[in-house]
Amino acid sequence: MKFLILTALEGPERQEVKKLMGETTVDFHPVTKTDYYIGQLTKHGVHQVYLGRTDQTNVNAGIETERAIQHFKPDYVFFLGVAGGLKDVKIGDIVIGKDVYGYEKGKATDKGFLPRPNFGFSSYEMERIANLYAHADEWKTIVAENKNENFDGSLVEVFAGTIAAGEKVDSSELSDLHKFLKINCSHALAIEMEGLGFLEVCRQHPQVKALLIRGISDLVENKSTADSSGSQNFASLNAAKFLFGLIDFVLTNNATSKNDSLDKDEKALILKAARELYPSGLKENSIWERAGGDLSKIALFGINGKTQWFEAFQLIEKGGAGRLTFKTLSQAMLDDYGDSPELLMILKKLAN
């Protein structure tokens, strides 16, 4: 699988994420020369991790997100960084961005500003998995080891909810912006400057699972004091630890999925059936896409059907086929060839 992680800032955000990536190399976009750190996760097969930086504002976040998705073609994409807390949170806490409220858009009239907000949404599946992980024993263990007496000293908490996103920094509860949000978006847990641009681009790539994660670095008032005490690094590292724990949680659950209930001979039967029933390869009768696969992940040009299927099965084995599994592929093949005893046998075992 491929995981793309984006941050807005270099020092307190991207570099904190990089600390958890292990050995990395640097890659440059072939056209723009945008720089990315590249690492690997090897606990459950070999999985690529790409780490980029967008700079601040929703516009920049949108541009860089689109560029990185087109270049790396990830299965998952995350935007991670700091945010200001608006309600119910403390410094160091983590907010899962279930949705984003874009507060800038509106109409200026002689009676005042009439808001016409934009909205963005994280992938439903990822938001649910992130909430599940927030209550898992694995995360509770990390939290117990992650107290910081400089910032309250209590355990880091994880919340899921609305994040406000615009082009402004809210640094006073007396500011017009803060008063506006209290009236028009009183349920927002945090405020930042990139989430809307990020999620708007991800909406146009439904094959990618997207999630916004923020660490709380200040509570609006006394922002400068909090920043000078290292709160941004603390919040960024908390969010990064949550993210990498979440990725491991996803990979662990994938590794223990029904794919592993098949032995080597049974997987060979599926491969044999695929080669015989679809000799032209993955495009024949749209079998790969109907099973939930992405053709862009397989090098098809100049490769015969037999080799395509071999490469495809290697991808499934490594957990890099996304939503496609041996079960979804077998089911799609069975839809075409319902009288295959081999496929019926495989599906029966997968269902047990």
Image (cartoon, helix red, strand yellow):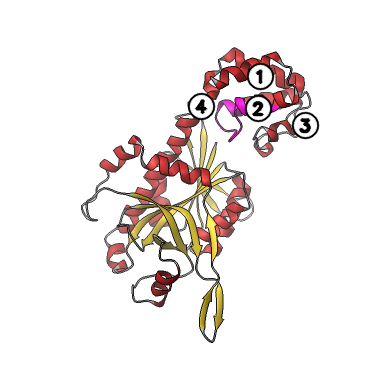
User: Which residue does the numbered mark 1 point to in the structure image?
Assistant: 270
Hey, which residue is sitting farthest bottom in the picture?
110
Q: Residue at x 47, y 58 (%)?
A: 8
Give whichever of discs 2 and 4 has the lower sequence position.
Answer: 4
Amino acid at pointer 3: Asn
* Horizontal relation, residue 179 to residue 321: left or right: left
Magenta part of the chain: 315-332
- Asked whether the residues under the numbered discs 4 and 3 touch, taking CB atoms below 8 Å apart as contact, a structural biologist would say no
Magenta region includes residue 331: yes
Instruction: Calculate the distance from the C-alpha at mark 4 to the C-alpha at mark 3.
Output: 27 Å
Residue 55, position in %: x, y?
49, 61
Give whichever of discs 4 and 1 has the lower sequence position.
Answer: 4
Secondary structure under badge 2?
helix
Secondary structure under badge 1?
helix
- Asked whether the residues under the numbered discs 1 and 2 touch, taking CB atoms below 8 Å apart as contact, a structural biologist would say yes
User: Which residue does the numbered mark 2 point to in the structure image?
Assistant: 329
Q: Which mark is residue 303?
A: none
Amino acid at pointer 1: Ile
Residue 257, position in %: x, y?
51, 27
- Figure check: 169 above or below 76: below
Give whichever of discs 4 and 3 has the lower sequence position.
Answer: 4
Amino acid at pointer 2: Leu
